[in-house]
Image: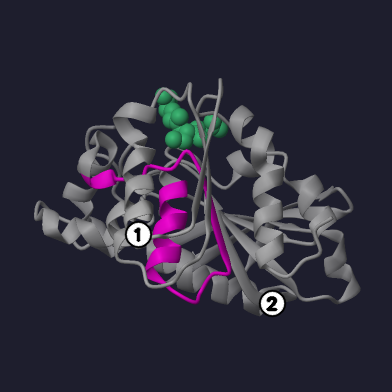
Amino acid sequence: MTLENISCQKSFGGWHKRYRHRSSTLNCDMVFAVYLPPQIEQGEKLPVLYWLSGLSCTDENFMQKAGAQRMAAELGIVIVAPDTSPRGAEVPGDPDGGWDFGHGAGFYLNATQAPWAQHYRMHDYVVHELPALIEASFPVSEQRGISGHSMGGHGALVCALRNPGRYRSVSAFAPICNPMTVPWGEKAFSRYLGEERSQWRAWDASALLAEATERLSILIDQGDRDDFLITQLKPETLEAAAKASSHPLTLRRQAGYDHSYYFIASFIEDHLRHHALALGRSVD
Ligand SMILES: N[C@@H](CCC(=O)N[C@@H](CS)C(=O)NCC(=O)O)C(=O)O
């Protein structure tokens, strides 16, 4: 497990760093970003929040636009932002050249269909390979939270729901809530998982929530001026599943906000506090 440091900037007393490594899960080189708050230099083992970005993003969007570093430094939380898919010349992308499938659109699942299955295993990368690498390479604890945006908000929900006990906290911004029934999800799932729709349920947050055993409380923010709200995101499906199974869900509809990182930056502090509380950090 060799990590190659490719950049390093001081931020709010801590460090923003990017690393490249060979992923055995994805069969390609991957880049991730990590924010190490100042407490890391005092020998404390800190908890880690994994952030999963949305369609067309890399590790850079969140770190550059969400404005999370100030609060992460205050709360003493490490943030890790992986890429959104396997990449590189050896990794097939969307044959139609779209931005909603292939490179930048791994959907945080394990593909079962050729030619995607050889590389597109973002679930196992995010849930297993990356945390093992982070926990072996940095002075962090095994306390993990997970959050994300849009495709990544859905990814965060699915990673938590599929792996009870692995995360202490979960939240999402404008997640795709029921991908089995919307164009982004139908395009990705039919290719990554095949045409048999019964196989899709295991990767759909609303279907998983209906059968969840662990009662991890979920925080979601959703802008009501989000262009994707009705056609792609459908938060009402997750809300109905949570209600039917008495799962703790706080879904906040935020008036006037769209799908962008301007929206995320407006509420990231609340999400970091939600995670900090569950991860055992003191929150004033
Ligand atoms: N690339 C698409 C937009 C896709 C999009 O809105 N991506 C969201 C996630 S679903 C995002 O976070 N974009 C990157 C950014 O705003 O920095 C386009 O050109 O229309």
Q: Is residue 236 above or below residue 123?
A: above
Within the image, what quadrant is residue 102 found in?
A: top left
Q: Secondary structure at mark 2?
A: strand
Residue 105, position as x, y percentages in the image = 37, 44
Q: Residue at x 68, y 38 (%)?
A: 64
Q: Is residue 45 above or below residue 4?
A: below
The residue range painted magenta reads: 153-180
Q: Return the disc, 1 or 2, that comes first in the chain's sequence.
A: 2
> Is residue 92 shown to the viewer in this render?
yes
As measured in the structure, the alpha-carbon distance from the residue carrying label 1 to the one carrying label 2 is: 27 Å
Q: Amino acid at mark 1?
A: Leu
Q: Amino acid at mark 2?
A: Ser
Question: Tag count in the figure?
Answer: 2
Residue 117, position as x, y percentages in the image = 25, 62
Q: Residue at x 30, y 66 (%)?
A: 211
The reply to whether the residue tagged 1 has its Cβ within 8 angstroms of ligand 1 is no
Disc assigned to residue 209: 1
Within the image, what quadrant is residue 229 found in?
A: top left
Residue 91, position as x, y percentages in the image = 33, 53
The residue labelled by disc 2 is 141
Q: Nearer the viewer, mark 1 or mark 2?
A: 1
The 10 Å Cα crowd at callout 2, few under 14, some 14 to 19, many 20 or more, is: some
